[in-house]
Image (cartoon, rainbow, N blue to C red):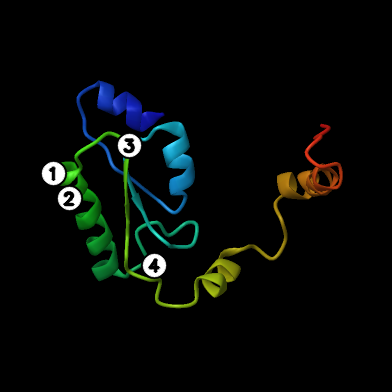
Amino acid sequence: MLARYFEAQGFATVLITNMPYWAEKIGVPRTYAVEHPFGQPIGKPNDHQRQRQVLLHALSMLLRAEEPGEIWQDETPWDEPLEEAIRKWQPLQPSPILRHLQPRIRDLIRHKGQFRV
């Protein structure tokens, strides 16, 4: 939403995200997709070389993107197995909202999409 607002005001934007599917669904003007764990969209803390690389590639979209809604995929793999990095990122205990929703999600699966709040 902010990207579209800024674009309407004349500012070019690029969203850096690990969720390009949703960027496409909501209509982000330009998306740079990375295969990074949540909370680290431009790289690990203090990894200045990787952070700079991601930012420069994303900014190059401003010059080279040809159509609205373009999604560019970063080709640099995360430097450890992504599943392991994601596990490290996860808190030991689920947040209160997830604890509240877990039974409802199970119920949704059991009842084939008929979600009851």
Q: Are marks 2 and 3 in contact (CB under 8 Å)?
A: no
Secondary element under disc 2, as helix, strand or loop, is helix
**Relative image position of residue 96 (x, y in whole percent):** 74, 47
Q: Are marks 1 and 2 in contact (CB under 8 Å)?
A: yes
Secondary element under disc 3, as helix, strand or loop, is loop
Q: Earlier in the sequence, mark 3 or mark 4?
A: 4
Amino acid, disc 2: Ser
Amino acid, disc 4: Lys
25 sits to left or right of 115: left
- Picture residue at 37% right of the left edge, 35% below the top: 28
Mark 4, residue position? 44
What's the CA distance linking mark 4 and mark 1? 26 Å
Mark 3, residue position? 69
Mark 1, residue position? 63
What's the CA distance linking mark 1 and mark 2? 5 Å
What's the CA distance linking mark 4 and mark 2? 21 Å
Mark 2, residue position? 60
**Which class describes the residues within 10 Å of circle 3: few (<14), some (14-19), or many (20+)?**
some
Q: Are marks 3 and 4 in contact (CB under 8 Å)?
A: no
Q: Earlier in the sequence, mark 2 or mark 3?
A: 2
Q: Quadrant of the C terminus?
A: top right
- Picture residue at 70% right of the left edge, 51% below the top: 95
**Relative image position of residue 87 (x, y in whole percent):** 60, 69
Which of pointers 3 and 4 indicates the residue nearer the eye? 3
